[in-house]
Image (cartoon, rainbow, N blue to C red):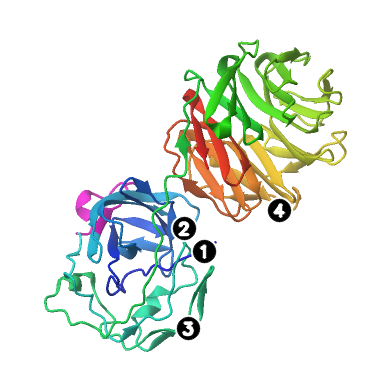
Amino acid sequence: MRKFMVLIAPLVVAGCGAGKGTVQVTVEGRASAVDRLVVVVENAGRTSQPTRLQPAGHPVDLPPAQTFTLLFPPDRSGPIEVRVEAQDAMGRAVGSGKGMGELVPGKLSAVLVKLMGGIETDMGAADLAPAPDLAPPGDGPLPAQDLAMADLAMADLGMADLAMADLAMADLAMADLAMADLAVGDLTMADLAMADLAKPDLAMSDLSMPDLAKPDLAMPDLSFPDLAPAPWLPVMNASGGKNLYGIWGANANEVYVVGSGGLIMLGTNGGTKWTAQMSGTNSDLWGVWGSGPNDVYAVGLGGTILRSTDKGANWKRQLSGSQNTLFGIWGSGPKDVFVVELTSLLHSGDSGSTWIKQPTGIYNGFRAVWGSGANDVYLTGDGKVVLHSVNGGANWDPQPLGGIDPLLAIWGSGALVITSGTTAKIYVSADGGAKWTLRPSGVVGDLHSVWGSGANNVYIGGSSGTILNSADGGASWMALMSGTNQTLRGVWGSGPGDIYAVGEMGTVLHRK
């Protein structure tokens, strides 16, 4: 993943350079143990992906205020909104706020963000530190001396997952500081020298000083990325506002969604056309899966199992032998299909003609099933453990997670297995379930679904429009802007560039 450098206060970036707009953001308020600031910028109807900034010496306390500088291409201008969430090391929000400003090419603009929330109950508004004087110094550069920046190129960068852990900004106040051959992600910064700074203890109030002396400043033609468009777009559909509980696709042009009242919808044309199908039932459908376009199952309330062998044109009900709600379905192929319910596990080895209850050796209140193959199948649910079978379901080995919260979804890629559940819990195993680690999600609420195109591109959907993404095998999670407050109960994609999230009130989101 490519990264770019943002300088954090007290050092201030000098100059705008080549007509590019510069926005200096100051974050005020009171918050303790701030490990990172998550920043989202809106300008001219476009929204950046969330960007993480880590202050030097993190975690830090506010006050004092934290300041960082953003640069924009010359063609970006107009009103700008900066939203900031302060998070602790566990990813929990300890404060959030937003500020407005005006982006002007070639000029320095100021945005003040005052954090609210996560504040101690005995702190009043009067305790907040006053806003510093951020009046821009006209067209002239900011005061600095003998600051040379050479051979610096920054192009085609995305505003996501910015890490500053290896950059000690506190040391920038020292004289005779040399920084050479610094590699940040795919970005190499060579021959960068910063020495003999005339004002090592530069305070923010100094920005309004008159008659600023112009430094000996050389800046190359820097190239900064444009703001990325909002990644999740709502899809108009024929659900009539019914809740959607599950999604699966045979390919990018054949995507099935199931929901309340027996709803089954087929999305075609890359998800631009959605058609309601005749399911033949009024029972809520909670899960959908298929081995291919002509072998698709839907399961749900009252032991309902439906199967279509003609791309959804007709659905035939199968005898499950159960009256319980069936929550999930997965198979390694057309003749090896598992269905989970609260009290047992159902298995069919003959394309659904018969379903047999399979003993697991433990009551788990099953909610989800997934596997990488016939001899690598996982179950999870209310029992706070994961069950694993390596012999086609003949035997199941419990894998305790050490938690107390029900688990609602499970997915994996190779040896990586991820399960999510209530109270925003995410457990990750990198060795096929031999060891499980609780990972911070940074959100609240329940996490209902998990899917990935690979180990380094995993998505989780949950309460209040939550969509999380991990690019490092589940070690860390970034909340994405979904644009909805509806609970998202299903996530699926045909690949890393074609992903859906579905949920309550007929919500269908599509990222391409």
Pointer 1: what residue? 2
For the residues marked 4 and 3, what is the alpha-carbon distance in whole angstroms? 36 Å
Question: Are the residues tagged 2 and 1 within 8 Å (C-beta)?
Answer: yes
Residue beneath the point at 67% across and 39% down? 410
- Residue 425 drawn above or below residue 324: below
Tag 4, which secondary structure?
loop
Number of other residues with Cα within 10 Å of mark 2, as a class: few under 14, some 14 to 19, many 20 or more: many
Residue 64 location, x and y as percent?
29, 64
Of the residues shown, which amino acid type is indicated by label 4? Ala
For the residues marked 1 and 4, what is the alpha-carbon distance in whole angstroms? 25 Å
Q: Which mark is residue 180?
A: 3
Identify the image quadrant of residue 464: top left
For the residues marked 2 and 1, what is the alpha-carbon distance in whole angstroms? 7 Å
For the residues marked 4 and 2, what is the alpha-carbon distance in whole angstroms? 28 Å
The disc, 4 or 3, on the residue closer to the chain's N-terminal end is: 3
For the residues marked 3 and 1, what is the alpha-carbon distance in whole angstroms? 19 Å
Quadrant of the snapshot with the N terminus: bottom right
Residue 401 location, x and y as percent?
68, 44
Of the residues shown, which amino acid type is indicated by label 2? Gly
Pointer 2: what residue? 158
Tag 3, which secondary structure?
loop
Tag 2, which secondary structure?
loop
Tag 1, which secondary structure?
loop
Q: Residue furthest front?
A: 269
The disc, 2 or 1, on the residue closer to the chain's N-terminal end is: 1
- Residue 7 drawn above or below residue 384: below
The disc, 3 or 2, on the residue closer to the chain's N-terminal end is: 2
Residue 268 location, x and y as percent?
59, 29
Pointer 4: what residue? 430
Magenta stretch: residue 120 in it?
yes
